[in-house]
Amino acid sequence: MLRIPQKLHTFDFRHMFHSNFIHLSMKKSNLCTFATALLLTLPSYSSAALNLLESKSGNTPLKVNARHTTGGKNVIDNSLKKSPKGTADNDDDFEIVTFHPKGEYKSLGTGTYCEGLFSFYGAPEQLRWNVEIEESVEVPGWYRLQPYKDSNPITDLIGKCDDTYIYVNATDPDFVWCEDMILYDGQYLFSQLIPENEWIGYMEYGQFEDGVINMEDAWFCAYNYIMERWEHCEDGFFRIGLPGVKIPNYNLKAASEFHDSDNLHTVIFEKGEDVTDVYVATSRGLMEIDRETAEFIVQEGDLVPAGVNYIAVTDIAKNGRGLYTVCLVGMNESKEIVGSATTMVFVELDNEDEWEYLGRGYWQEGLISPHLQGATLIQLNVDIEKHKTIKDYYRLVNPLTEHEFLSPYLVETTNHNHYIYINATDNDGVYLEPSEIGLHTPNGQSAVWSYAGMRIDQGFDLEVLKSYGYCGKLADGVITFPDNTLMYAETGYFEGNFVSSGDRFKVDLYHTVASAIETDTDATDTPVEYFNLQGMHVDRPSQGIFLRRQGDKVTKEVIR
């Protein structure tokens, strides 16, 4: 196994869970009654909190992604904008400032649209398709297109088309920008961070060169109705190629199961036609690939043989239990680094000689139930083991065995158990270690972690994490965590990325309950309300995926 150097990213602990928010006092928005109520029941620290995983259907809902960015730039308040359409106190359409010429546009022919915005809502990255492109007759360099008018991967996910034009000003090739985009009847709002769109203090322009509008270095944000925030959304793949211009296809994607019963992992990858070489390396922990890391992988990693689209990872178990990242780097014909991809795998070992039986306790699940429709918060008895030499280091043995709703999704194994590892060696700084839990929902294998555990794995100081309230506590034999400080992942959801979780999670090390006890209150007599995935009220929901609120409980429901 190649050990990739770990690097700490600049990070402001005051914004740990808000790091992907464009910090506004910015575009004006009125208070949304629904959003306020919803935040009382859903994890509320980040956009990842909105990822109620829809494991009971095969659909891929478009909802806020778990993508995080470092930092977040402050901007000056801007009261010139009205609130987006659909907020509680404003029935007007969201107003934008328009600059595009109103006269005639002529068709240039069919170009290429590389989608880079809707991945914020869970759509796959690096999508591309053909689209007709028009240019202003009066002001050459102003372009317009209707990328969502006809059938394409985004319209297939949303379930309908949208004939809205996107206007792009490329009259100055060094300062290329898009007007605000209001798509699908106001459900999806995108804005490039530039003064023309009333973002004071931002100059996040794209470039136009050799017939390609390149927004790689531009910043876009999307309006999140439920959180009432504008959030950074652009993923670096947003490009428009004029007719006759080829945009190289440097796509690189990787996927794998979290765990195999013999700790033998197979990574399947796809590469674009213009990626000629792929290098691979595996490193312990959760890795992100920046330029320096990519260069290191090319120098020290293994070259995947031509014509092969899978990688067998067979030797990492000797490095011990834990989470590993398989890192891929793509190069083009000119030997330039042009893309990267990662996927996570877990090594699970019983290590029975290191652990001893503590007894029978119970845990209040609160990790998975916030994400799966039909999985209520319950208390479950569980066998608990403690480490023989490390004080207050515990693991829950096959923790979901007695879960009536989830047990049908458990993977049957005969050669090992599944565990949730809890490090409580500092009773005021408790965290979960990354654990593959043996659950295989329709969205794939599942894993859990805690936010503090992830940051400790990246080298952050436990005392700092404690000071900001991201750790659990052990007191009088009971382990508790603050809500929204735990994490959950599924291999087939958001490319296996962890999303925030944690709802009244608790472990009692020494007491049991008589049987599985549901802790949610009964709200069957209260009215049912429906909202779309952007938090907008829907009177008569038709086909699609909706948030269903009854009393203080919010679930996701698929209406066919």
Image: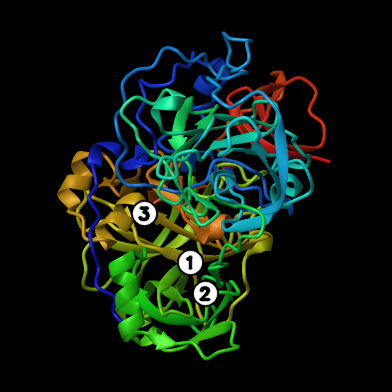
Mark 3 touching mark 1, by CB under 8 A?
no
Q: Where is residue 174? Give x, y as percent.
A: 40, 44
Give the label on residue 436, or none. Answer: 1
Q: Where is residue 62? Give x, y as percent.
A: 64, 43
The quadrant of the rendering that contains the C terminus is top right
Mark 3 touching mark 2, by CB under 8 A?
no
**Residue highlighted by disc 2:** 259
Q: Is residue 485 left or right of residue 147?
A: left
Q: Is residue 114 left or right of residue 320?
A: right
How many labels were placed on the picture? 3
Image: 556 above or below 130:
above
Mark 1 touching mark 2, by CB under 8 A?
yes
Q: Helix, strand or loop at disc 3?
A: loop
The quadrant of the rendering that contains the N terminus is bottom left
* The residue positioned farthest toward the bottom in the image shown: 305
Give the label on residue 96, or none. Answer: none
Give the label on residue 509, or none. Answer: 3
Q: Amino acid at mark 3?
A: Leu
Q: Residue at x 38, y 21 (%)?
A: 26
Mark 2 Cα within 10 Å, few/some/many (few <14, many 20+)?
A: many
Could you tell me how far apart the alpha carbons at marks 3 and 2 are, in whole angstroms?
A: 27 Å
